[in-house]
Image: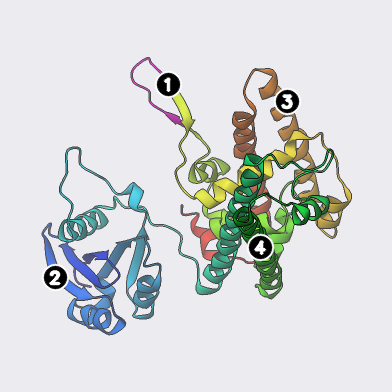
Amino acid sequence: MGSLRFVGMDVHAEKITVAIAEENGTVAVWGDIFNREEAIRKLVQKLGPKEQLRVCYEAGPTGYALYRQMRRLGVECAVVAPSLIPVKPGDRVKTNRRDAKKLAWCHRNGDLTAVWVPDEEQESLRDLVRAREAAKKDQTRARHRLSKLLLRHGQRPPEGVRAWTSKYGEWLKKVQLLGKAQQVVVEDYLHEVDHCGARLQRLEKAIHEAIQEAPAGMRAVIENLQSLRGVAEVIAVTLVTEVGPFSRFASPRQLMAYSGVVASESSSGERVRQGGITKTGNAHLRRVIVEAAWAYRHRPAIGSTLRRRQKNLSGEILEISWKAQQRLHQKYRRLLGRGKNQPQTIVAVARELLGFLWAIAVKVEPAVNLWPTAVASRKT
């Protein structure tokens, strides 16, 4: 076998800048090609035997189409995390050619961190989950526009009527403002709130149907994760689609670091200084895990909804779930007692909740033969 050639690609919507690092130490820019399948196929043919090529490019808006094409052509390809690419202090020049050369150089030196790439079926489910998240944000904005407009004009619901309940909706339809133009605005905002609600329901129904059609192994992981309090169907499927195989993390601490809910640190010599959470990694994962952690404010209990989700699950999984309730509620009360504010406390609970999620997933994934290569390699 000949020497390996490390190919760095700076990928954009229309063009790709290509650089090559040889094993002997030389790095050179090959040139630009159009970001089209035929042009990429011709490039691979020109670069030499595909067994000797090691291609990489940054994760970004172009997605994984290039990665999948390279795999179909038999070329080893890695999609790397942009935030973890080494940067020289003082380097203020950034061009496509320099970026491609840096990728090739760092790939040859082993300084790049590859991200997990979902298959097409997993990515389609993840897109559906993210569309639901976007719809939820749009609903919140629409509700805020309407409620703040009414507040500016002194319109308040009757005593005892909670916001966005059915009674609140009936009150909204009866609201009358003095100006005709203002009434048009109210009706338009109310229509947008109803539209966002209907859109959210459609997407949640589509997610439920997609889960039923998902592979049996993925369904098993989603069902077992729902044994935990605060982890309903939407949150469970979000965790599975955003994390992928939990078994690729050798320990729960690695998963915590990946989610960005661990404390940042700036220590030097004898001085140790810790700050807020790093907020690195996957923001979608961080959002849902914090949302789930709020359920542990309440004392341990198994209500009818949680009991229904835990039906037909193994005793080992149920034991982990009950232990999580006891431990995380105690942590919540202990941190509040020490003077921590509630948001800080919830983030700390969310960090530990990830450990229980990891413990459940790594027991289920090997049993259902889900992502067997990830279980074997334990790559992060």
Q: Position of residue 138 (x, y in %)?
A: 58, 56
- Measured in 3D between alpha carbons, the distance from the residue under mark 1 to the one under mark 2, in whole angstroms, is 46 Å
Which disc is residue 191 wearing? 4
Residue that mark 3 sits on: 333
Q: Are marks 1 and 2 in contact (CB under 8 Å)?
A: no
Which numbered disc flags the more N-terminal residue, 1 or 4?
4
- Which amino acid, by three-letter code, is at mark 2? Gly
Q: Earlier in the sequence, mark 1 or mark 2?
A: 2
Q: Is residue 44 visible?
A: yes
**Residue at 82% across, 55% down:** 310
Which residue is identified by label 1? 273
Q: Which residues are magenta?
A: 264-273
Three-letter code, disc 1: Arg
* Residue in the picture at 86% in, 45% down: 302
Would you name the residue on which mark 2 appears?
31
Secondary structure at badge 1 equals: loop
Distance, label 3 to label 2, CA atoms, is 60 Å
Residue 293 drawn above or below residue 164: above
What amino acid is found at the position of numbered circle 3 in the picture?
Answer: Arg
In this rendering, is residue 26 above or below 331? Answer: below
The residue at the far right in this view is 304
Q: Name the amino acid type tagged 4.
A: His
* Of pointers 4 and 2, the one earlier in the residue sequence: 2
User: How crowded is the residue under tag 3: few (<14 C-alpha within 10 Å), some, or many (20+)?
Assistant: some
Q: CA distance from mark 3 to mark 1?
A: 25 Å
- Left or right, 135 with respect to 39, comes to right
Q: Residue at x 12, y 57 (%)?
A: 25
